[in-house]
Image: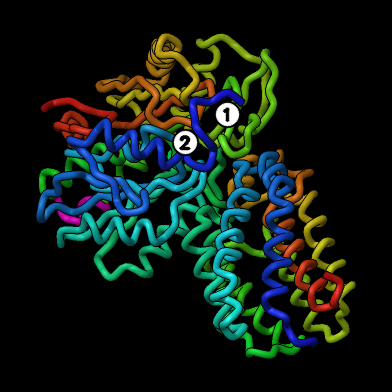
Amino acid sequence: MKKLMNSAGTILTESLDGFVAAHGDIVSLGAEHKFVRRKNLKPGKVALLSGGGAGHEPLHAGLVGFGMLDAACPGQVFTSPTPDQMLEATQAVDTGAGTLFIVKNYEGDVMNFEMALDMCGSTVETVITDDDVAVENSLYTTGRRGVAGTLVVEKIVGAAAEKGADLQKLKALGDRVNRATRSMGVALTSCTVPAAGKPTFEISGTEMEMGVGIHGEPGRRRVALKSANEIAEEMVAAIAGDLKAKGDCLLFVNGFGGTPAMELYVMYNAALAQLAKHGLKPCRSLVGSYVTSLDMAGCSITVSKFDDEMATMWDAPVHTAALRWGM
Amino acid sequence: MPHVNFPKLLDHVAATVISHAEELTALDSAIGDADHGLNMKRGFELVLADKDRLAAMSLPEALKAIGMILVMKVGGASGPLYGTLFMTLGKELPAEPTVADTARALDAAITAMKARGKAELGNKTMLDVLSPVVAHLASGNATFESVRTTAFAGADATIPMKATKGRASFLGDRSIGHMDPGSRSSSLMIAAICDVLEGKA
């Protein structure tokens, strides 16, 4: 394992210290590294709180700031945060209008946020994101994973919260954006969890994992590596077949941490051509590594069917470490 | 049931979990996210760090305190689930439990874990170890050896199962052929408890 670190035991806290030092104009750190919060809260605004295992940076701490989250609780690498973190973060950022939890659909995350909600005196609603089409949905299983589409939910709900929407409206909007959003991921390499010291799975130079999540968990199947056009064809077909919608959409090509921007734009170009076949037309776009899986090479494609309100909220000003526009 | 030497029980269960951390993480690498051993190790190291405080408590109070440490420090799915297990055992067990008390308390803990994790028997989880162990304890003819065997057989039985809960469920059929890491850690802890009560550890 080669990583820029001092020790696996301190990688998370040192990274958070660096993050907060670099973005001290936007964020500050909670006690014992339990959460990253927006430096200047807006009284009367519903607080937006998310969190999850570390290793997905810049998600979620990089999305704390004006127009998005009020706090983010980082867990250990790929491990959900604990209830005390969400509890203390909620107490720190709730200004009286209630708090919305945005939780990616993993059992650990859902259970820890639920336990925090049970202990919390304040008014809390929860939006659970589950945009990954690689997982078959079923009443009898965990259901789909929350992956890169979570960023879309956080952006749109964050903008609406900034404009003064109440907790119930934000909960409904978050659920609506999640229902309009689908993602699919492909991995060319595994990733290495710092404390584990070796890649989570072995994969040869001529293979890829189709349908991966964001934790180095293997995908649904391993196949021979194909061209970008062929990969995009399969991913977009899976997304469009499930979304069953036509018209304006957001196209978000997200890198997993080990793939250069050059390749992400190749995938954007390839996905664009495929979307046209399915009657989907990107009216907004985002390309970059935002919801990562440590050092994994590969990407996910996220498509959100946009209506006018969602497009307006997407365009609304945002000022976070990772996303900044309109101000 | 023999008197519980609680500090010794704590030491041996924690040492067992910590010494199997790599194996648990390796099992989790195959079908999960490669953190089960690391998380359990971190949780039980913190339990050990609090040993003096815990040893001064009654068994029920100590179990509740261990559950709270696991919930607040482990994270992931194993923190809330093992935390719920220990906290429920603490609520249900008397200070000097019999085998029948243990079976009843463990049954209550399983009910609480099912509610928290929304899992059932056969989903390839730690319930596939805990449920047969409870049934065996309730049968009235359990020995330390037969409890250990039941626990390990429960973990082995998860190998051919297709996971429908947890991150392993995202793999679909590819989860078949691997032991569930949570079932392994549960069986190790049960065996470690048997070892101490039997005077073998």
Residue A244 visible, this orientation: no
Q: Position of residue B4 (x, y in %)?
A: 73, 83
Tell me if residue A168 is in the magenta stretch.
Answer: yes
A250 up-or-down from B115: above or below: above
3D distance between C-alphas at marks 2 and 1: 10 Å
Picture quarter containing residue B86? bottom right
Furthest residue to the front?
B52
B157 up-or-down from A230: above or below: below
Element type where label 1 sits in the image: loop
Question: Mostly what secondary structure, the magenta segment?
Answer: helix
Q: Which residues are magenta?
A: A165-171
B3 up-or-down from B28: above or below: below
| Residues tagged 2 and 1 counted as in contact (Cβ below 8 A) | yes
Q: Position of residue A324 (x, y in %)?
A: 21, 27
The residue indicated by pointer 1 is A191
Chain at tag 2: A
Label 1 sits on what residue type? Cys
